[in-house]
Amino acid sequence: MATTAVSTANPYMARQAGTTKLATTYAPAIGVSQLRKKITMLQQDLQAYGSRPSTSHKVYEQSGEVAATGLYLLYIAQSSASAITMYSERDSCLCKVHWHHISNQRLHRRVRSPSSMTRTPIYLDGTALIRMRRAVDRNLAIRAEDLHLKSLQFLVAEAFRTHNISAAVIACRGSSPQTQY
Amino acid sequence: MASRFSLLRQQNFLEAMIPPGVSISYIKAKEVSAYKSDPTMLMQEKLRSLPTKAFVLTTPVDRAARNVENVKKYTELYDQAGHMFMSFL
């Protein structure tokens, strides 16, 4: 076994993407089965909502494990070049944002509770939506994969900003002795 | 398989997620089972030494812990010091 803890100032390293997987959780302390149930519910809701499966959606549908500690869950249920759908545990709501509508400065939001199908407030406030719109405007010209990555980076940055956190701990673990460095 | 789970790939991806202006600490555990408590203890030590609350970023959270007891320790860290955890599936 070899474990090391290394501290360093943020070198603002090259933002190289190791992967474009896009599901993220800021999860409260809930059980895995509970989370799976919520995600299943969300997926059913998305189907009822009229979402069409696409290649890019498959990436997200494989998400369904994991529960950690945190304040709320923000689950990127689906994302494509034109839209991103988010599920916020804190508000139990679904928010679908269409990039092209945002870029046209016509914020198109449809929000409803996955469980009750009633409209509820959304997690992202007006400021966040404006910030998101600007981020999207900056990124519309790039490839879809990059757009996904940038969208995720934006959401993570929002989490840091929302909770006023200025420190991060990157935890990596590998169990295989053949782990490549 | 080995490269898929490489620490470097995890690290690169997570670094790419962190916005500028955030100080980063690293915890790297090589050849360690997530069922063991060693990485959790290391994490506890690290987080307790931080002067401010932090976001802990991992690729799937089972990289950090795979049993209820260890997850409970993380929950305590959140309750006591406000440290938060963010996992990427």
Image (tube, coloured by chain):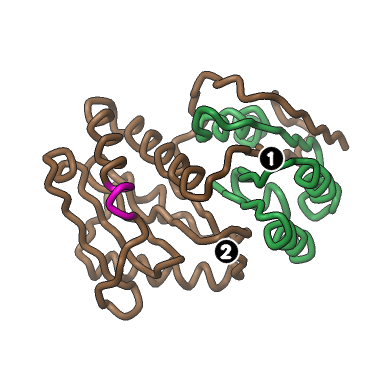
Chain colours: A brown, B green
- In terms of secondary structure, what is the magenta stretch mainly? helix
Residue B54: quarter of image: top right
Kind of residue indicated by mark 1: Ala
Residue ID at (34%, 52%)? A78
B51 w.r.t. B2: above or below? below
Measured from the top left, where is residue A109 in percent x and y? 20, 57
Residue ID at (32%, 73%)? A113
Which residue position is annotated with label 1?
A171
Look at the image and tell me whether residue B17 can be seen.
Answer: yes
The disc placed on residue A28 is 2
Residue ID at (43%, 56%)? A75
Look at the image and tell me whether residue B66 can be seen.
Answer: no
Q: Which residues are magenta?
A: A125-129
- Chain at numbered mark 1: A
Sooner in the amino-acid sequence: mark 2 or mark 1: 2
Q: Are marks 2 and 1 on the same chain?
A: yes
Secondary structure beneath dot 2 equals: loop
Is residue A140 found inside the magenta-colored segment of the image?
no
In the figure, is residue A67 to the left or right of B51? left
Measured from the top left, where is residue B89 in percent x and y? 53, 49
